[in-house]
Image (spheres, rainbow, N blue to C red):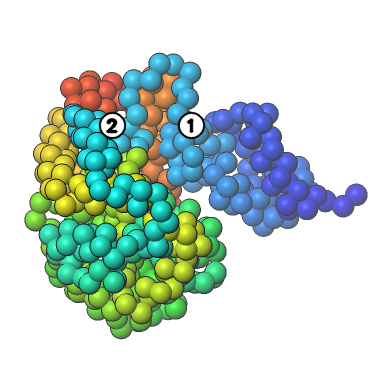
Amino acid sequence: MRPPSYKAVVDEFATAIRSGAIPAGERLPTHRALARERRIALATATRVYAELAAMGLVVGEPGRGTFVRVRSGYDGLEPSRALAVPRVADLSFNQPLAPGQGNLLRQALRTLAATGDVEALLRQHPPGGRRHDRAIVATYLLDRGIDTAPRDVLLTGGTQQALDCVLRALTRPGDVLAVDALSYPGIKLIASAHGLELAPIPVTATGPDLDAFDRLCRARPVRALYAIPTVHNPLGWVLDREQRDRLVAVARARDCLIIEDGTYAFLEASPPVPLRPLAPERTCYVAGLSKNVASGLRFGFAVLPGRHVESVTRILRTAAWGAPGVVTALATGWLCDGTVTRLEQDRRKDAAARQDIARAALAGLDVTAHPASYTVWLGLEPHQRPDRVADVLAAEGILVSTGDAFATGPLRPTALRLALATPALDELGPVLHHLRDTIEAIPP
């Protein structure tokens, strides 16, 4: 009798795990035991578990074994937000909303309805947006330290679409994309969809290890670097000018594109100059209004080197044909009348207040955060499996993100990422105290 193929074993395990036949948290056979049971080579057994881990179905722990992943927290794919108990708080996703924003929307819609040519909003807009709307974004970016011509700005349906279209246009399957070893989970989804190889750069307390980035670029043909230099997600760092200059120098020396994500940059009151002005010939800057205004307002933009505008525009035409007229009108109206600037100021104050609450509630724990950001990176004890901790918290009605959602390489951090923006401000302290008490009560 022939031994089962490697793919057949993977499919069998995947089906059993997804159906619940092998329950969450179950310890699987060791690599050697699996090889004996299935009459396969040890290397094949290792490959089976590696593929199951890549599918997000299992997690390996050095010295303890391989376990079926518990999927109660956000793990970088589609989070399950249906809990078996009443929800206490969602700390897995940032959806900041200021009091009265609903009224702002009502007023903005009334203003749109009263404009002279409201039917123009229902007509097809060009891919990348109309020149007038692109000029409004270019003016807004001046306050972020980016001076660009409107022709180099393209409007998108959010920052994620901007990232997706830029990488689709400027890379090819098999290209190497350098990325921080801990980074925004959405970049992993895009890289997987387009066949890009992620090359993780080790991180330090103050930013990526730029010596390691230089060595990577010397050793391999890195096509692009994805960077979050200002208020990093999830670690909160802000690269200083010396680090930015060094990063740009390495990218120039190795002819590497830079994809700069400015999603949370507005939270830094006095940020250093962005990477885009330091290397305009190779930097694509992407951002949007999901965190500074509202996550449901899917409006973003990309600022590109002139030679890449046409190719990214073609991809935008393929993805969405044209910019959404009503959303663009709402967004540009708020950019023009100062609403976005006022909301950003309010967000900075709100985020700083939430960080004060978090520092008090989590004092003495392993906490990494920017002092005015909406995220906390919470290190756990070595014996605490993040997926298991997330499951215990979910049983208490608290959703969190596990650290491996942010890991771009094989190392899986023993940590949680806490999103502070969604709970009401007066509820955040009690929620974090409850979270701390629950974690500390988990036995070794």
* Front-lying residue, 331 or 226: 331
Name which quarter of the figure residue 128 lies in: bottom left
Residue positioned 56% across, 41% down in the render: 58
Residue positioned 63% across, 43% down in the render: 30
Percent across and percent down for residue 45 are 68, 51
- Kindly identify which numbered label has been placed on residue 80: 1
- Kindly identify which numbered label has been placed on residue 422: 2
Secondary element at image label 2: loop
Task: Find the residue positioned furthest to the front.
Answer: 116
Task: Find the residue positioned furthest to the bottom.
Answer: 253
Real-space CA distance between mark 1 and mark 2, rounded to the nearest whole angstrom:
16 Å
Percent across and percent down for residue 331 are 26, 48
* Front-lying residue, 172 or 430: 172
Residue positioned 83% across, 51% down in the render: 3
* Front-lying residue, 439 or 124: 124
Percent across and percent down for residue 51 are 61, 51
- Residue 57 in sight from this viewpoint: yes
Identify the mark nearer the N-term, 1 or 2.
1
- The type of residue carrying mark 2 is Thr
- Kindly identify which numbered label has been placed on residue 144: none
- The type of residue carrying mark 1 is Ser
* Front-lying residue, 104 or 264: 104
Residue positioned 47% across, 56% down in the render: 320
